[in-house]
Image: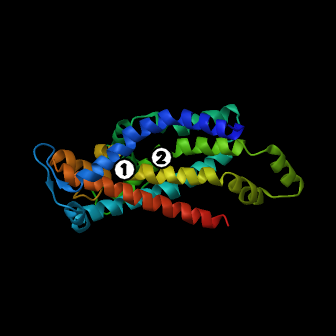
């Protein structure tokens, strides 16, 4: 046996336990859920095979369309909000001074808080009577702008996007800082000697060298956005009139509120399909941008 084959064997043996655990706890439940999606089932009793009936109902259901639209808003807010802000902060805070470490900790703090706690905090911020936002508008002379921010179907989803962005900037910032610190200092020194300006260095050296990290964070943004549930559930419960309903909350309500386990399984399978399409599309676009 060659050394290369032995190394490959060691790698396979090392990965096998994690692969088995992943298969048992992730792949099998996904396939099981997809299988339930072909049945009309209340969670107990006999299951009735209905083929693609649940999926056809999903396509025709206006609430699902609303949930999908809202989820796309969250995805867009995450990708175009969290990623640029985290990247900008990483460029400013990539040094290790005491002040910068403190700011990093402050930015990362929302990530260690429970989503329920964050939902409660922002619920008070948006509260129409005692909320900080309305009080601030009154204080600066814009009292006419005061409103019930989470009760207005026209803006409630956009207002919810703000705490979602705020919540997850920290981990992406840390990932970008780690990637920037791994850029060899010789490359930056040589470009500085050649007269490269800061913006030139950013777009010609730093961003290309951390592009793979950016692609990973975009994948995390998309997949995490399509799983968003607890923050929305705490703050609005999907209301008013489904205006803040997301795919995950829509699936939860159908599965555990009205006990349509087959329909809920079809929704969860649809979420996986939508997530796969969005992630594949984003990676394709980002690969083209690097050419």
How crowded pointer 1 is (Cα within 10 Å; few <14, some 14-19, many 20+) is rated as many
Where residue 149 sits in the image (x, y, percent)? 32, 54
In the rendered image, the quadrant that contains the C terminus is bottom right
The residue positioned 35% from the left and 44% from the top of the image is 28
State the residue lying farthest toward the right.
193
Is 47 located above or below residue 76 in the figure? above
Q: Taking the image as drawn, is residue 149 in sight?
A: no
Camera-side mark, 1 or 2? 2
Asked where in the image residue 13 lies, by quadrant, the reply is top right
For the rendered model, the colour scheme is rainbow
Q: Residue at x 38, y 58 (%)?
A: 273
With 51 as the anchor, is 173 left or right in this view? Answer: right
What residue is shown with label 1?
Answer: 134
Residue 248 point in image, percent of width and height: 31, 51
Q: Residue furthest front?
A: 1
Query: From where the camera sits, is residue 291 visible?
Result: yes
Q: Is residue 246 left or right of residue 139?
A: left
Q: Secondary structure at mark 2?
A: helix
Q: Label 2 belongs to which residue?
A: 166
Residue 223 location in percent, x, y? 44, 51
Q: Earlier in the sequence, mark 1 or mark 2?
A: 1
Q: Nearer the viewer, residue 267 or 72?
A: 267
Q: In this orientation, which residue lies closer to the viewer: 133 or 169? A: 169
């Amino acid at each position: 046996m060659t050394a290369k084959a032995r190394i490959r064997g060691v790698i396979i043996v090392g990965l096998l336990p994690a692969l088995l655990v992943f298969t048992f706890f992730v792949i099998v439940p996904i396939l099981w859920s997809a299988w339930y999606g072909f049945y009309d089932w209340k969670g107990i009793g006999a299951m009735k095979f209905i083929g693609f009936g649940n999926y056809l109902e999903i396509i025709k259901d206006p609430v699902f369309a609303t949930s999908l639209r809202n989820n796309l808003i969250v995805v867009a807010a995450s990708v175009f909000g969290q990623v640029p802000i985290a990247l900008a902060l990483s460029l400013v805070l990539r040094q290790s001074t005491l002040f910068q470490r403190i700011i990093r900790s402050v930015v990362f703090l929302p990530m260690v808080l429970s989503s329920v706690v964050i939902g409660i905090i922002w619920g008070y911020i948006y509260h129409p009577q005692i909320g900080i936002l309305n009080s601030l508008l009154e204080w600066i002379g814009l009292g006419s702008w005061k409103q019930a921010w989470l009760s207005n179907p026209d803006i409630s989803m956009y207002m919810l996007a703000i705490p979602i962005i705020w919540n997850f900037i920290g981990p992406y910032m840390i990932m970008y800082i780690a990637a920037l610190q791994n850029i060899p200092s010789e490359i930056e020194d040589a470009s500085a000697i050649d007269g490269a300006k800061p913006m030139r260095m950013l777009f010609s050296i730093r961003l290309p060298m951390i592009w793979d990290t950016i692609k990973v964070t975009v994948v995390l943004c998309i997949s995490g956005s399509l799983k968003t549930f607890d923050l929305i559930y705490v703050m609005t419960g999907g209301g008013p009139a489904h205006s803040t309903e997301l795919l995950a909350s829509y699936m939860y309500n159908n599965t555990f509120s009205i006990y349509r386990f087959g329909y809920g399984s079809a929704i969860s399978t649809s979420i996986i399909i939508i997530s796969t399409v969005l992630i594949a599309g984003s990676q394709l676009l980002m690969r083209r941008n690097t050419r």
